[in-house]
Image: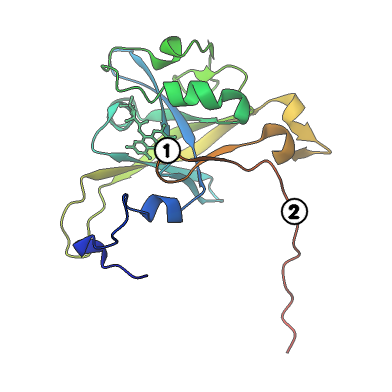
């Protein structure tokens, strides 16, 4: 099948786009408002965008609390979503008023971060402490505003649980990340395999 995206003529019950661009990692973003209100929410429009420096990005459909807090206080933390936290991660996506602490709502404990003010979720396998570098409000191919906000940050500190490290490596088969698909789908991708990089042979 083929469909013209702007005509939405896929004939399917739901738009398949997010199921195709999948699995997406989930950034579980903690942030602070200017008045000190704590916020925690999952974002699957999330990824690393540069290794050196370590840069990450999450994208908000409109100025949700996480993006607004990042604008106000210029810091956020990306908490790692392993299977051990899949249910609580989802609970923190509740559309609560901005003065509600979603961590408390989901029964999560927090611990202080080291280089940034927003706390991190206790017992996550890893947490990336970030300082905001820029915002981008992406446009469509005609230059029209999309209404989305991309928040970029430099990772300035990384916490890793000691038991996530096996033979010196952050071990996927221990940390068992949860990812997002389309619809109500999530993925569990805690299985890995290796491939060597190809050599160029003329
Ligand atoms: C797994 C998952 C991934 C999500 N990814 C996004 C996303 O990438 N962008 C977005 O705007 N909302 C996303 N949401 C919805 C937000 O988490 C939800 O709107 C939340 O209430 C926003 O919280 P905030 O206003 O406190 O930032 C996602 C929800 C779930 C459960």
Q: How far apart are marks 2 and 1 (CA)?
A: 27 Å
Residue 130 visible (yes or no): yes
Q: Which residue is drawn at 41% across and 22% down?
A: 92
Residue 61 at x, y = what percent? Answer: 27, 40
Callout 2 environment at 10 Å: few (<14), some (14 to 19), or many (20+)?
few
- Camera-side residue: 185 or 45? 185
Residue 76 at x, y = what percent? Answer: 42, 29
Q: In the rendered structure, are the residues bearing label 2 and label 1 in contact, judged by CB atoms less than 8 Å apart?
A: no
Is the residue 2 above or below the residue 66 in the image?
Answer: below
Q: Which residue is drawn at 34% across and 70% down?
A: 2
Quadrant (top left/top right/bottom left/bottom right) for the N terminus: bottom left
Q: Which residue is drawn at 44% across and 56% down?
A: 20
Disc with the residue nearer the chain's start (2 vs 1) = 1
Left or right: where 55 falls relative to 45: right
Left or right: where 179 falls relative to 202: left
Q: Is mark 1 within 8 Å of ligand 1?
A: no
Q: Which colour scheme is used?
A: rainbow
Callout 1 environment at 10 Å: few (<14), some (14 to 19), or many (20+)?
few
Displayed quadrant of residue 84: top right
Residue 192 at x, y = what percent? Answer: 72, 49
SS of the residue under disc 2: loop
Ligand 1 positioned in quadrant: top left
SS of the residue under disc 1: loop
Residue 191 at x, y = what percent? Answer: 71, 45
Q: Residue at x 28, y 12 (%)?
A: 99
- The residue indicated by pointer 2 is 193
- The residue indicated by pointer 1 is 184
Residue 171 visible (yes or no): no
Total number of numbered discs in the rendering = 2
């Amino acid at each position: 099948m083929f469909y013209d995206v702007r005509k939405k003529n896929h004939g399917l019950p739901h738009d398949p786009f997010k199921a195709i661009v999948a699995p997406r990692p989930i950034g579980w973003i903690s942030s602070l408002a200017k008045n000190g209100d704590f916020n925690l929410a999952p974002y699957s429009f999330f990824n690393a965008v540069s290794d050196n420096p370590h840069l990450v990005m999450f994208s908000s459909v409109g100025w949700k609390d996480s993006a607004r807090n990042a604008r106000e206080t210029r810091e956020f933390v990306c908490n790692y979503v392993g299977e051990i936290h899949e249910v609580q991660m989802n609970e923190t996506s509740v559309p609560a008023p901005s003065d509600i602490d979603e961590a408390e709502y989901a029964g999560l404990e927090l611990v202080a971060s080291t280089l940034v003010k927003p706390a991190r979720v206790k017992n996550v396998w890893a947490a990336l402490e970030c300082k905001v570098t820029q915002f981008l409000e992406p446009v469509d191919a005609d230059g029209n505003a999309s209404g989305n906000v991309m928040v970029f940050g430099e990772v300035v500190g990384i916490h890793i649980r000691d038991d996530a490290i096996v033979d010196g490596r952050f071990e996927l088969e221990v940390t068992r990340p949860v990812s997002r698909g389309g619809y109500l789908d999530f993925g569990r991708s805690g299985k890995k395999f290796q491939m060597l990089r190809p050599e160029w042979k003329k």
